[in-house]
């Protein structure tokens, strides 16, 4: 059973890494200076591991944050209140070990 759980965990991390790579690509299209190259080293693995600990809704908010969306835009896109988005962003920053959005985006590289 533990082997099956490890496999599912590894598959989940792989899926998260693919999603984050796609987000980084989108971010670099918006502003190439924010993402000069795709990182494949320990930091991106660390970021993907931390992102795997997020809830599904937090991952949705993370995707929006990494794409440069403001809280109000995220709230409108997800159909939740502005306060709910602020709470999600705070939790994401805490779980990802980032002080602010800029640091979060930097760590996503």
Image (tube, helix red, strand yellow):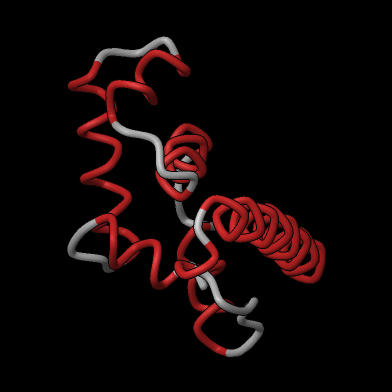
Q: Image quadrant for the N terminus? A: bottom right
Which residue shows up at 49% across the image and 45% down it?
A: 67
| Number of numbered discs visible in the structure rendering | 0
- At which x and y percent is residue 50? 46, 65
Judge left or right: residue 43 versus residue 20.
Answer: left
- At which x and y percent is residue 31? 50, 58
- At which x and y percent is residue 101? 28, 55
Q: In which quarter of the image is residue 24?
A: bottom right
93 lies above or below 87: below
35 lies above or below 11: below
83 lies above or below 40: above
> 5 or 45, which lies in front?
45
Which residue shows up at 66% across the image and 58% down it?
A: 25
- At which x and y percent is residue 29? 62, 54
> 5 or 50, which lies in front?
50
> 37 or 71, which lies in front?
37
């Amino acid at each position: 059973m533990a082997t099956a759980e490890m496999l599912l965990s590894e598959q989940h991390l792989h899926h998260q890494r693919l999603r984050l790579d796609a987000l980084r690509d989108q971010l670099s299209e918006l502003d190439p200076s924010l993402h000069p190259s795709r990182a494949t080293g320990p930091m991106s693995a660390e970021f993907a591991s931390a992102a795997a600990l997020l809830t599904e809704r937090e991952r949705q908010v993370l995707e929006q944050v990494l794409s440069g969306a403001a809280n109000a835009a995220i709230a409108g896109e997800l159909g939740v209140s502005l306060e709910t988005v602020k709470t999600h962003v705070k939790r994401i920053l805490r779980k990802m070990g980032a002080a602010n959005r800029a640091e979060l985006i930097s760590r996503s590289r």
